[in-house]
Image (cartoon, rainbow, N blue to C red):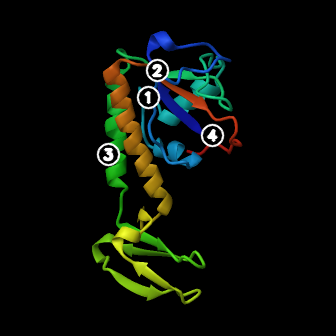
Amino acid sequence: MAFRFLAVPAHRLVNFPQTLPDDERLEPELPPVHEAVERALTGAEFRDMRAKDRLRILLQGDRPPSLGAPETGFGPSAIFAHPPQDLPALLRLADELENLARREAGERALVWKCGDCGARYAVPVALVRQVSIRCERCGTPVELAATRSLGEESLIDPFLGAVNHSRRELAAFFREAMARGWPVLVAEDKRVPRTQPSA
């Protein structure tokens, strides 16, 4: 399942099938990897319940969500957290997400790609030097300069970088939404095929 979080002022909430307003909206900047958000919430709790379980109950439970969709292709939105009653629980969730990101960061590496064949090369950040190597696949020179890298990834699991980025973005988003006093909404992307629930 692909989740989308957003926040709007309470007086701007509309009912489905209308779309929530664009002009006054707050959203986390999440990577375009559908599973990253769900995995980012793994191990995190909100109000004595796993955060992912709460999302499933809100979006697929006996009482279907009824608020406006974020945009076309999304189902109706449900309120995940509402200030002020959910403020302490949401701030605890934000802290928990940041702690998970710190704990699972692992060693970081800069990544490059061969311009001809697309072979990828990763070098631990601590060992990066400006050198040129020959691609093992096609022999084309690849410049391993920090300024020309594609960015950082986790050496253990490249997908973990997207997951931890999602955790930090969600934590900042939750804090900002609560600071503004806006309800936090969640919706399901109907364009993404459903997968089996994971733990």
**Can you tell which quarter of the image residue 60 is in?**
top right
Mark closest to the chain's N terminus, 2 or 4: 4
Give the position of the C terminus as an image quadrant. top right
Which residue is label 3 attached to?
99
Q: Which circle's residue, 2 or 3, is located before the other in the chain?
A: 2
Q: Is residue 189 above or below residue 120?
A: above
Amino acid type of disc 4?
A: Met
Mark sitting earlier along the chain (4/1): 4
Against 7, residue 158 (above or below) is below
- The residue pinned by badge 4 equals 1
Q: Up-down: is 19 above or below 113? A: above
In the figure, is residue 139 to the left or right of 93? right
Q: Which mark is residue 8?
A: 2
Please, what is the three-letter code of the amino acid marked with disc 3?
Answer: Asn
Whether tag 1 and tag 2 are in contact, CB under 8 A, the answer is yes
Numbered disc 4: secondary structure: loop
Question: 10 Å neighbourhood of mark 4: few (<14), some, or many (≥20)?
Answer: some
Residue at figure coordinates x 49%, y 28% from the top left = 6
Labels 3, 1: front one: 1
